[in-house]
Image: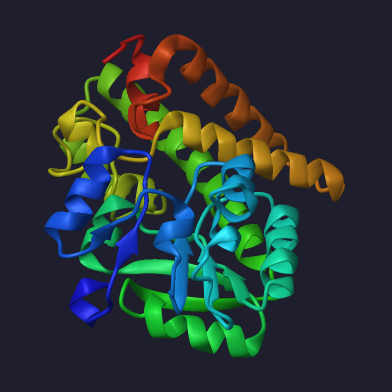
Amino acid sequence: LKSGNFELSGFDVNPTALSELSKAGGQAAATPAEAAENASFVITMLPSNDHVKKVYKGPDGILSSKGWKQGCLCIDSSTIDPLVSREVNDEVTLAGGAFVDAPVSGGVGGAEAGTLTFMVGGTDANFEHSKTVLNEMGANIVHCGDVGTGEVAKLCNNMVLAISMLGVSEAMNLGEKLGMDPKVLAGIMNTSTARCWSSDTYNPTPGVIDGVPSSRNYEGGFGTALMLKDLGLATDAAKASAAPVPIGASAQAMYELMVANGLGSKDFSVAYQFLKGNKP
């Protein structure tokens, strides 16, 4: 965003994140309300439904900002319940602002490179306006429909991702136990019908791909606990809409086991090590 010549103010509960913002030329704020003062755009990315509600509607929340700017476009890139997105949209609209939900895909690498995919839910006008900012951070900005549909797309995407990572982890572990070189097996899979992002871009086996979490003890990626949270949202939505997701539910049970075994903070590709009986 700084490279796009935006003036930035930000808030995070993590002091390290605020320090990095300051080093990049942004201004560290003490509260969400302070960060939102006189802002034309507000971007939020938070772990859960409750966090989003608190950051927007809490005592020090965005909507309590003394410098709240009429017409401000709020872009929430959290992965949450679509109903919560619609609730926050109503509150922001009532306060004279505008809102889109815009969850992302592409991982830490995509964020650093500015090549993320944004799945956006909102009116046509708000979607077009959001691209002023989102084009600086992403390479693929998709209008999914009304508010909440961005979240629907993200939950479906992450359910597939969670399932595919387990499948790749099982196959890589099986091949290794049967005497196959992991790099050779991955190369075959990545040029065959098993090819997928979990294998050719984010392989869970150490030594197959440099620079991914499996090459650094599963640190610095997308946490297993966060993947479990997303699967919970997906399966809850499936129950509410009477959509059968038996494989998604099985994946959820697997990630629950991983979290229960102390792997919640590790990248979700640690499934490979869990299947091997290891705890990195």
Q: Nearer the viewer, residue 134 or 87?
A: 87
Which residue is at a point 50% across and 87% down the rendered structure image? 129
Q: Position of residue 232 (x, y in %)?
A: 65, 36
Instruction: Give the quadrant of the N terminus.
Output: bottom left
The image quadrant that residue 199 belongs to is top left
Which residue is at a point 68% across and 32% down the rendered structure image? 249
Q: Nearer the viewer, residue 5 or 257?
A: 5
Q: Nearer the viewer, residue 67 or 45?
A: 67
Q: Is residue 182 above or below residue 136?
A: above
Which residue is at a point 55% across and 32% down the rendered structure image? 228
Which residue is at a point 56% across and 21% down the rendered structure image? 256
Q: Is 37 on the left-hand or right-hand side of 173?
A: right
Q: Is residue 45 above or below residue 219?
A: below
From where the camera sits, is residue 236 visible? yes
Q: Position of residue 78 (x, y in %)?
A: 52, 53
Q: Nearer the viewer, residue 246 or 71?
A: 71
Q: Is 46 on the left-hand or right-hand side of 217?
A: right
Q: Position of residue 224 (x, y in %)?
A: 44, 30
From where the camera sits, is residue 195 visible? no
Instruction: Give the quadrant of the C terminus.
Output: top left
Q: Position of residue 82 (x, y in %)?
A: 70, 56
Q: How many numbered marks have been drawn onto this rendered protein structure?
A: 0
Q: Is residue 9 above or below residue 125?
A: above
Q: Is 75 on the left-hand or right-hand side of 85?
A: left
Q: How is the image coloured?
A: rainbow
